[in-house]
Image (spheres, coloured by chain):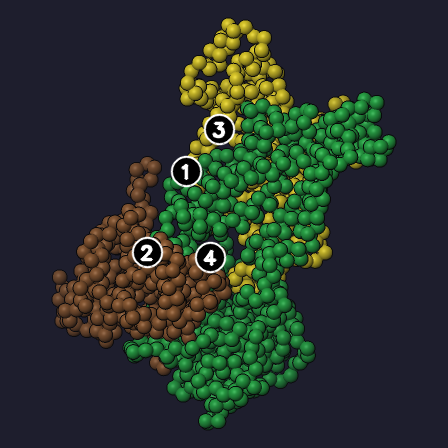
Amino acid sequence: MSSYIAKRLLYAVPVLFGLTIIVFLIMAMIPGDPATAILGSYATPENVERLNRQLGLDKSLAEQYWIWLGNMLQGDFGRSYSLNRPVLDEVLERFGATLILAGSALLLCSILGLLAGVYSAVRQFGWGDRLITLFVLIGISLPSFWLGLLLILLFAVEWKLLPASGMYAIYGGGDLPDLIAHLTLPAITLSVVATGVIARLTRASMLEILRQDYIRTARAKGLGERRVIARHAFKSALVSVIPVIGIQAGFVLGGAVYIETVFQWPGIGRMLVQAIATRDILLVQGGVLIVAASYVLFNLLADVLQHKLDPRLKT
Amino acid sequence: MDATILEAKQLVRTFGGGRTLFGREKPGVHAVREMELQVRRGETLGIVGESGCGKSTLARMLVGLDSPTSGDIYLEGAAMDTQSARQRHDLAKRIQYVFQDPVSSLNPRKTIRASLEAPMIHLLGLDRDARRRRLDELMDAVNLRPEFLDRYPHEFSGGQAQRIGIARALAAQPEILVLDEPVSALDVSVQAQVLNLLADLKDKYGLTYIFISHDLSVVEAVSDRVMVMYFGSVVELAESESLFRQPRHQYTKLLFDSVPLPGKRGVRGEDGLAELPDPLNPPKGCAFAPRCAEASQQCREAMPPLNPVVDIQHYTACYHPVGTGPQESQNTRDQ
Amino acid sequence: MSGKQKNSGRPTAWRLFVNNRLALSGLVILSVIILLALLAPILPLASPDETAPAQRLIRPLGDGYLLGSDHLGRDLLSRLLWGTQVSIAVGLSATIVAAFFGSLIGLVAGYAGGKVDNSLMRGIDMVMAFPYILLALAIVAALGPGLMNALYAIAVVNIPFFARNIRGVTLGLARREFVDAARLSGKGHIRILLTEILPNVLPTIVITMSTTVGWMILETAGLSFLGLGAQPPQADLGSMLGEGRKLLFTAPHVSIIPGLMIFLLVMSINLMGDGIRDVLDPRLKSGALSRPMAKTEDARNITPGNRDQKTGTAMEVMNLRTEFQVGQEIYKAVGGVSFDLRPGECLGLVGESGSGKSVTAMSLLGLVPTPPGRIAGGEVRYEGEDLLGASLSRLQSLRGGKIAYVFQDPLSTLHPLFTVGDQICEAIRAHQPLGRAEAWKRAVELLNKVRIPNAERRAHDYPHQMSGGMRQRVGIAMALANDAEILVADEPTTALDVTVQAQVLKLLKELQRESDAALLFITHDFGVVSEICDRVAVMYAGRIVEVGSTDQILTRPAHPYTRKLIDCVPVMGRREKRLEAIAGLPPVVNRLPAGCAFADRCEAADDDCRKGELLLEEMSDRHAVRCRKAKEAA
C-alpha cells in the first residue's frame, strides 16, 4: 500500500507541474501590456519599461516560466499590488477559511448523499425514493448563489436565526459555536448540488450492483438482506462513488467562489473575485494555484482510498 | 492439392514489454512463442487449444488484424507486410475472418445490407448492379432469405447472425477463411447447421479453412489436419485421423482424456492444479513439464523441437511421446 | 434467462419519451420558456433597457409592471425574457463548442489508443486537475470579463467531461469485433471512425449534451452573477441576479425572480435530459434497472400448504411454472416442470439456452429476480414444506444450508472485494454459531477439501488472483460449507477449459459421493451428463420432454428432440461425414404453440401433435416422455 501511495505521489508531481504551466500560459494570454495594465494608462513609457524589466517580460516565455517557477518554489509568489502584501501570506490566510467551508460542505454532502442514495435504491419506487429523487432533481437544478440569497432572506432576515454573513461576529465572537452559527448556511448551500449528484450516483450504482451475480451468490448463501445490502452491495457502490466524491470536491471548491461572495465569507474564492475585478494578476495566480494543488492532493487521497477498497486495482 | 498457400516462419507475438521510462526492461506477455505454420491449399487446418494457448492471437495475425512482434507470414511465398495499408487491403481480398461472437461482429446500427456491401465497395469496387447480384448470390449461399438484408443485427438469432458473418467473409471472394471459434457461441442444435453450411461452402468455392476451436469433437469433425497448441507453441501437428487415433504429446493425451463423452464414464482429471506457467516469464523448457507425469530433467531445461514421431506426417514437440515405449523415454531420461 | 426482446411492438423513441411524465413536463416547461424568450421582440413589452427613475423598485403586480421594476425603473418582465434569451443562447453555444471539441478528442483518443490516447488524456487530466469553476475564473481573469469570454471559459472547462465520456464509449467500441470486421472489409481508419463508430457514439454525445446543457447555463449565470460575464447594458439572468443581490433586503423580488427563472430553466432541461437518457440508454430501455427483490414473487393462485411428500425423495417439484413479464409480454420460461430428486443421486437437467433449465434451478429457492420474474404456479417440496410459499427468513435458513448452489461463472459470482476465505466464512457463519477464528479454520479445511494447494495462504486471496478452475473450487467449497443435503449446480463447468473441467467434475463426483447429497446438475453437454449424472431430464421450451436414467436417455432416447440433440453434436473419436442438424429454431416462450412445442422441427409430427396438452407419460420403469408418437411406439 505504502509503495502505491509513494507511486501516486510521484505521479502527482507532473500534474502539479502541468498546473503551473497552464496557469502561467493563461496569465500570459492577457492581451496588451501587463505593465500598462498594472500601472494604468497614465504611466510614463520609462516606468512601463522599467516594470517590464523588473517583471522579466523582456525575456522569452520559457525563460519567464522558469524564473517564475523558481521563485514560487522558494515561496515567493510575488506581491499583491492591490493589498500591498506578499501573495502567499494573503492566500494562505484566506485558504484556511475556504478549507473550513469546503471541508464541512464536502463532509455533509458525502454523508447525506450516500445515505439518501442507498435508501433510495433499497426502497426503489417507494415514497421515500420518489421524495429523494425529487429533492435530488431540485438540488442539482438550483443555482447555489440564488439558494444562498433565499436562505439569507429566510433564516437571517425573516426568522433571525442565523447570521447572514461573515465568519465570526464582529463583536465578541470568535469561538467555535460562533463559527458554527456562521458556517451553517453557507455550508448547507454549498453542499446541496454535490449531495444531489452523489445521491443520484449512489442510487444508480447500488441498483446496478444489486443485479450482479455475486449478490445472487450472497443471497444463495443464506445471508440476511440487511447484510447483503450493507456489506456486499454498499462496499462495491463505495468503490464507484469515491472517485465521484473526489470530483465533487472540485465542484465544492469551485462553488465556494459563489458562496463566499454571497455570504461574505473571507475565503479564497471571494479574494479571487476581488482580485479579478482589480486585475491583481499575481494574486489570482497564487490563489488558483493553491486551490488547484489542494484539489490534486485531495484526489490523490480519494484514489488511495479507492485502492484500499478495491484489491483488483492493486496489480 | 498439397501446395502451401499460407506459411508462417518463426512467428512471435509479445504483448506489452518494451522499456520503462528509466530504461528498465518491462516483462511482456508471450502470447505466441516462435511457431511455424503451413497451410495447404484446399485443406481444413484445425487448431485446438485451451484458453491462453495463443490460438486467437495467431488467427488475428494471419488475417492482418495484428502484426507479429517478429517472424513473417507468407501468402503463396510472398511476405505479408501488415504495416502497409495497401498490403492489408490486398490481403483482405484473399484472407477473411469469421468471428466467434456473431452478434458483436455486426455493427448494431447498420443494416445487414450495409455490412455485406462494405467489402464489395471497398475491396472489390463493385457497382450497384454487381453488388445486388452478389448479395442475392451470397444470401442464397448461406440459406438466408433476401428480405433479411434490410434488417438490423439484433433481429437475428445467433445462428442466423453467424451465417451473415460467414456471408460477409465470403463477400470479398477470398481463398482462405480463418474461422475463430465460429460455433462456440451457438447452441448445439444450431452448431450443426453452421458446420454443415461451412462444409458445403468449402466445396462450392474451393476454400481453404483455418478452423480454430477449443472443442476437440468439432475440430475432429471438420479438419484434415490438426495442430494442437499449448502456451503459445505448437505441441503436435498431424493428419486428423492419425492424431485422434493416437495422440503423441503428453498434453494432447491429457486433453483427449479430459473430454467427457456421451455414453462413457471416466474422464481423467489431474490431481494437481491445471495451471499455465506465468506468461510474463515463460519457462526455459517444455511449458507442459510442470503438469506432466513423464517430465524429466531434459524437459525442464530445453524446449523440445517439433519432430516427426512414428509417422512422417505426425509431428510432436515432446521428449517422451506417448506410445513409443519405455525404452526410448528411458534413453532420453538418461541423457 | 429468456428475456430476449424481439422488435415486435417495441415503442418508438418518441413514444417512450412521451410516456415519461416527468420528461414530458420538462419539455412543456422548456418549450414555454423558449417560446416566451423568442417572442420577446414581438410581445408588447417595454424596452429592457429603458430606465424610469420615478418607477424604481416597484413590487410585482404593481402599477403596470407585471413583475415589478428594478433600481433603475426598468421593466423586470421584459428584462427577464431578454435575459433568458441570452442565457439560453450562451449555454447552448457553450455546450455545442464543448461537445464538438470534447467528442473529437474522445473519439480520436479512444480509437487510436496507445500513445495518442495517453498523451491526449494526460492533457485532459491536467485540465481536470483544476477545480471546475476555478479554471473558468482564471480564463476570464486573463481574457477580461465579458459574455463571450465567459462562454469560452465554460466551454473549455467542459471539454474534458465530453472527452472522457466519449473516449470511454469509443474505447469499448473500438475493441468490438464489428470494427475488426470493417477493417477486413477494406475500410480505412477515418471511414471506420465516421461510419462505424460515430453512429454508435452519437447517443452518448446526445445524452451528455442533454445532461450538461443545464449545468452550463447555471455556470455562465454564475460567472455573470460574479460580474465576470455579461456586462451592462447587456444582461443575462445571472447578471440580473448579481445586480439584484445588492437590493436583497430592500427589494428581494429583483433578485428572486431571475433566480427562479434560472431554476425553472435548468430544471426543465434536466428533466428532459433524464428522459432522453432513459430513451437512448439501451440498458435502461430493457427495464432491467429495477432492483431484484430478495425472493421471487409468489404469484400462484392457490398456495398448497404443507403435506407429506413422496417417500424417498429429497425434493419434489410439481408443475413448476415461472414467468417473466417484460412490458406487455409474458415469457413462460418454465411452463410446468415436475421432477423429484432422491438423496445421493445426481439428476441432470439438460437443454439449450432458453429451455428454462437455469430458471427452474433458481426458482427452487426463490432466486429468480423479481421483477421481472415471478412464480406462476406449482409446488416445490422439501421435507413436506412448500418452498415457493415459504417466508424469506425460512428461505434464508435453507439457502446455503440444507440446499446450496454452485453457479456457472465463478468470476462474476464471487464478490470481487472480499477474500475467498472471508466469503466462505460468511457462508459458514450464516448457518452455524461459530466465532470468526473458528469459521476461518473451517474455511481453510473446506479449501483443503476441494484440493486448493496452500489453502491457508490462498484463503487470503481475492477471486481475481485465482485461476478459473480454482475459483470454481472456491464456489464448491462454499456450497459444501454447511453439509448441504441438496446441491444445485448451474453449469458449473461450462466456463472452464476441458482439462480443468475434467478436474472439477471428478472433484464434484467424489464430494457428492462422500456427502451423499442429492445433486441437481444443469448442463447442455451430454458428455458431461454421462460423466456425472444418474438420471437425466431433457428440457425444451420450458418443459421436460423426456426423463429417464442416463443410460436410457443416451442409448434409447424416445423423444425425437432428445434423439436429435444427441445426434447433432459431433463426438470425439466417432467422426461422421455429416452432422444431423435440427432444422429451424426453438419457439419463443412468449408465443408457445399449442400441443408439442417441438412439432415444427419434427419430421414425424402430424396435425394431432399440434393440438391440446401433451403429458409427460411413463413408458417403462421411470422413463417418461412427452410425445404422442413415442407413446404409440412403446
Can the viewer see residue C5 in this picture?
no
Residue at screen point 42% across, 78% down: C582
Chain B, chosen colour in render: brown
Percent across and percent down for residue C336 are 57, 80
Percent across and percent down for residue C461 are 44, 56
Residue at screen point 62% across, 85% down: C308
Q: Nearer the viewer, residue C547 or A1?
A: C547
Q: Check residue B110 in the rendering and tell me which mark sits there, or answer none.
A: 4
Residue hosting label 3: A22
Q: Is residue C318 above or below residue C417?
A: below
Residue hosting label 1: C119
Q: Say what secondary structure mark 2 lies in.
A: helix
Percent across and percent down for residue C118 are 41, 40
For the residues labelled 2 and 1, say whether their Cβ atoms are less than 8 Å apart. Answer: no
Residue at screen point 60% across, 54% down: C278
User: Does label 3 lie on the same chain as label 4?
Assistant: no
Give the residue type at disc 1: Ser
User: Does label 4 lie on the same chain as label 1?
Assistant: no
Residue hosting label 2: B124
Chain at numbered mark 3: A
